[in-house]
Image: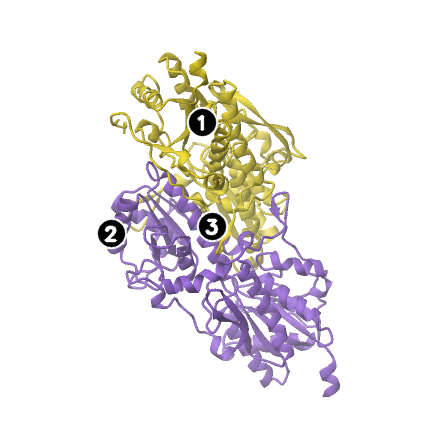
Chain colours: A yellow, B purple
């Protein structure tokens, strides 16, 4: 066994689910750290389009990339190797897929599985680790946390969130100045839609644009608080009458007490088709028809989570740190764990990297605590500010050429296949 | 007359129409330059909420602001004194308003009128100058160009445009990376809506994100080209099949051959009201129902024109320069003119400030030349790139504190009124 242990085994890294402005910084942390331990880790193979790359044996040889290209991942948004939305079913429902993963890992002598994603991928990561034991193929499965939704438990925050939070706060601050300038004769109500289907973290971060009171944003709508049109419209009207205008941040997941999403209210377009999405326009319409105010709305959509140009320095550092720590945890022999960000103090913000067992991470969703939201349900509390403020701190500008950020495109050279093809379940 | 000439007269400055990321940089240029010529220019009064401030004698004494606060205008977006959408009617229709302006200027010994706006305000500025002659009250009226729409003639570009163009190009570049990462299993078509009701300049700037060919954006829709659903859908489908995904930039002013705006297609919301705006969702719906692709759309709305955090350095410098030049032109005795940006060369971009007579600026709209748009109507030509590229060059970051840009809020101290109230025409 001793001789086998001394032979370096390869690593597999994949990106999962919605990408972020800093998920590649985690990839950078994983690959750069692995490269420093060539005695223990051979090559780092990346999955093309996430876990699908593992299932279809479509692996990318990251050793073909220069040190400079890998370093540039730190300032490049989105998923450099491709990501996917592909949830592996339970072991009982689709054991074949898990067995195929192990088969591919075996064929390429992969001893380390680094999976960079949110709650679903933590679950997949845990299952791979369990199956590896059952199937007698040793692999260390480490989950690298990532999600703009900030809904993973046991970590202070999720890499990706700090940057989208910063985009949110800056966008609200800038757009609110615009609205304030023009409110006398033009737009009275401005609505910005923030991502977050289940948790209101990104919308909450928009609250950092002002200090509360009559500073914008004046209203935040969270998925955690049932939407009541009457009290909402009353607050909009009062705000316009008192302040001259009203700035609203609404989470895409805002819903009525009966669970219906505001965005699914079912608008019908000119072609007679139900049009999905757009809680901001739905809300604007509600305001227009009830209060008559001139409105504008913004739906930044992917712009918010891809906005590497205004990434939070704190977030970039944390994203890199969890990637680095994942490799270090693996080298220390850990398995079925996730590097977690541990907050030591709010101001000054101090943090370190700890680790959390995947069994306690998988399938747990961290929503906004009720005491982060003001009593009336329309704003954030001092406690929320203390939590959120440090996460958007610092700027980490990418290099520019001719006015555009210089993001890297990797070669993404394929590793030769060794196995027969595998059909993905639809 | 000699003694009267030597007494410094006051200046009036107002912001007009939609604000931009850099209109305050022009204000900064006007005020700082005026402060350097106290022998010729007394105080600079700003109109609160634009020309309405002049009509209602609601003037702001900018001499109460510190040099530091005025300097900070250079990096503060939106309208620091308030702007307005208020078009003065023709002299024949509403002579009283023009006479009132002269009356207010006379009451406050205003000899210089600096009006910072687009085409409509150039027209107002010209009329003020004409009426001042007729009424025997001497005033020099100088128009300071500003509009994100980039549709003023006789100037290489319009301050405000370069920054929104940069936001557009960066946003498309970043969002396209996001879409490319996920296209295998998720969104296939992404649509970003750009401002520009009559001219496609901002949408065109989105084209700078790629170098054409199969680089995103793959399709740009301009108001200058009649929208044909069939050829559009064909191109979308081909692109998805060939590239794997399709990124579209659509101008809010995109319209059918019969002149109907795509955005006015008349979507009806859940409450039965016609919902205006949103060419992006309308287009998404068209794609979904005809091709069935999963889509996402973004409408950045005010976020794009307020995005001072990613302003173009070229734009900031030009905005300041036209403010400075306006004062210098006035001091040289000019009247009814606009400082204009004159391009000396494309690469390296060299420019200087010239001047244009308002009679030739007012009511002329500069659209995209046909040879800036590719033959198929879906992209920009090399000629357009040569024109656009230098305008987004350079970064000019605002100072940050606690992760947020530090924008200035002025004291905006009111000047004591001397005249009876004046009723604005509705």
**Rendered image: mark on residue B201:** none
**Rendered image: mark on residue B234:** 2
Q: Report the residue marked by disc 3.
A: A297
Q: Is residue A37 above or below residue A399?
A: above
Q: Depth check: give the residue in front, B211 or B167.
A: B211
Question: Are labels 1 and 3 on one chain?
Answer: yes
Q: Report the residue that reaches farthest toward the front.
A: A3
Label 2 and label 3: CA atoms lie apart by 30 Å
| Position in image of residue B28 (x %, y %) | 63, 64
Q: Secondary structure at mark 3?
A: strand
| Position in image of residue B21 (x %, y %) | 55, 58
Label 1 and label 2: CA atoms lie apart by 38 Å
Tell me which label, 1 or 3, sits earlier in the chain: 1
Q: Is residue B282 visible?
A: yes
| Callout 2 touching callout 3 (CB < 8 Å) | no
Label 1 and label 3: CA atoms lie apart by 31 Å
Chain for mark 1?
A
Q: Is residue B258 above or below residue A178?
A: below
Q: Depth check: give the residue in front, B36 or B226.
A: B36
Q: Report the residue marked by disc 1.
A: A119
| Position in image of residue A246 (x %, y %) | 55, 49
Q: Is residue A113 above or below residue A264?
A: above
Chain for mark 3?
A
Question: Are labels 2 and 3 on one chain?
Answer: no
């Amino acid at each position: 066994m001793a001789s086998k242990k001394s032979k370096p085994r390869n690593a597999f890294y994949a990106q999962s689910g919605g990408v972020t402005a800093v998920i590649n910084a985690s990839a950078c942390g994983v690959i750069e750290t692995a490269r420093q331990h060539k005695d223990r880790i051979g090559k780092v193979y990346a999955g093309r389009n996430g876990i699908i790359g593992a299932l279809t044996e479509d692996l990318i040889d990251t050793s073909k990339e220069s040190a400079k290209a890998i370093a540039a991942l730190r300032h490049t948004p989105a998923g450099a190797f491709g990501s996917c939305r592909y949830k592996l079913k339970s072991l009982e429902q689709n054991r074949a897929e898990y067995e195929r993963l192990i088969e591919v890992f075996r064929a390429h002598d992969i001893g380390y599985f680094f999976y960079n994603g949110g709650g679903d991928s933590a679950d997949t990561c845990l299952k791979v680790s369990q199956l590896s034991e059952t199937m007698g193929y040793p692999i260390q499965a480490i989950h690298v946390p990532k999600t703009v939704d900030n809904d993973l438990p046991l970590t202070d925050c999720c890499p990706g969130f700090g940057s989208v939070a910063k985009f949110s706060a800056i966008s609200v601050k800038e757009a609110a100045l615009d609205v304030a300038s023009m409110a006398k004769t033009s737009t009275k109500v401005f609505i910005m839609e923030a991502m977050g289907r289940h948790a209101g973290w990104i919308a909450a971060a928009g609250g950092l644009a002002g200090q509360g009171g009559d500073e914008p944003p004046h209203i935040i709508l969270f998925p955690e608080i049932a939407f009541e049109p009457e009290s909402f419209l009353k607050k909009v009207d009062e705000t316009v009458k008192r302040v001259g205008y009203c700035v609203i941040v609404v989470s895409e997941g805002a819903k009525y007490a009966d669970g219906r999403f505001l965005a699914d209210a079912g608008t019908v377009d000119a072609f007679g088709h139900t049009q999905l999405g757009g809680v901001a326009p739905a809300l604007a319409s509600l305001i227009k028809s009830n209060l008559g105010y001139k409105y504008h709305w913004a739906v930044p959509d992917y712009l918010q989570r891809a906005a590497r140009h205004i990434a939070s320095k704190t977030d970039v550092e944390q994203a890199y740190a969890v990637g680095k720590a994942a490799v270090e945890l693996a080298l220390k022999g850990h398995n079925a764990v996730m590097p977690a960000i541990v907050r030591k103090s709010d101001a000054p913000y101090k943090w370190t990297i700890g680790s959390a067992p995947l069994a306690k991470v998988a399938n747990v969703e961290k929503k906004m605590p009720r005491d982060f939201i003001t009593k009336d349900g329309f704003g954030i509390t001092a406690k929320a500010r203390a939590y959120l403020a440090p996460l958007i701190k610092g700027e980490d500008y990418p290099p520019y050429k001719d006015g555009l950020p210089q993001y890297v495109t990797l070669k993404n050279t394929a590793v030769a296949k060794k196995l027969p093809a595998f059909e993905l379940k639809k």
